[in-house]
Image: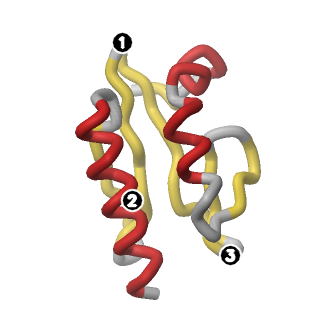
């Protein structure tokens, strides 16, 4: 599974806009850091998208293709950031 390229990130732009509201730094388009550590980035596989988010020290993969999946991802990110 490859990292999301420019065309995939274009399709994810509404989600990226929501992510930019969190206290994260977008070091490159679609790659977000929390402090000095990578926190979130995206992969594409055909027409499907996945987010790798660092939880408990390791990256975990979450689906991010449908509106429901993206809403769940945003909720998970919000909860993760409040815990720290």
Residue 49, picture quadrant:
top left
* Quarter of the rendering occupied by the N terminus: top left
Which of the two discs, 1 and 3, labels the residue nearer the N terminus? 3
What number of labels is visible? 3
Residue corresponding to mark 3: 35
Label 3 SS? loop
The residue closer to the viewer here, 67 or 45, is 67
Residue 46: image location, x then y, percent: 36, 12
Q: Earlier in the sequence, mark 2 or mark 1?
A: 1
Residue 38 lies left or right of residue 35; in this view the side is: left
Pinpoint residue 37: horizontal percent, then vertical percent: 62, 70
Residue to which mark 1 is pinned? 46
Mark 3 Cα within 10 Å, few/some/many (few <14, many 20+)? few
Question: Where 19 falls versus 29 (above or below)?
Answer: below
Q: Residue at x 54, y 34 (%)?
A: 14
- Could you give the CA–CA distance between mark 1 and mark 3, rounded to whole angstroms? 32 Å
Residue shown at 64%/63% (left/top)? 33
Query: Mark 2 and mark 1: span between their CA atoms?
Result: 21 Å
Q: Would you place residue 84 above or below residue 13 in this image?
A: below
Q: CA distance from mark 2 to mark 3?
A: 16 Å
| Residue in the picture at 36% in, 20% down | 45
| Other-residue count near label 2 (Cα within 10 Å), few / some / many at <14 / 14–19 / ≥20 | some
Residue 79 in the image: x percent, y percent?
35, 73
Closer to the chain start, of discs 2 and 3, is 3
Q: Residue 8: image x %, image y %? A: 53, 20
Q: Please tell me whether mark 2 or mark 3 is closer to you in this view.
A: 3
**Position above or below: 5 against 28:** above
| Residue carrying label 2 | 59
Q: Is residue 20 above or below residue 34?
A: above
């Amino acid at each position: 599974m490859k990292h999301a390229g420019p065309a995939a990130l274009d399709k994810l732009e509404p989600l990226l806009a929501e992510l930019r509201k969190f206290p994260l730094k977008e070091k490159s388009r679609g790659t977000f850091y929390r402090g000095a550590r990578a926190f979130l980035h995206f992969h594409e596989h055909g027409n499907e998208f996945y987010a790798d988010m660092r939880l408990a020290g390791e990256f975990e993969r979450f689906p991010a293709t449908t509106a429901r999946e993206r809403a769940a991802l945003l909720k998970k990110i919000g909860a993760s950031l409040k815990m720290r």
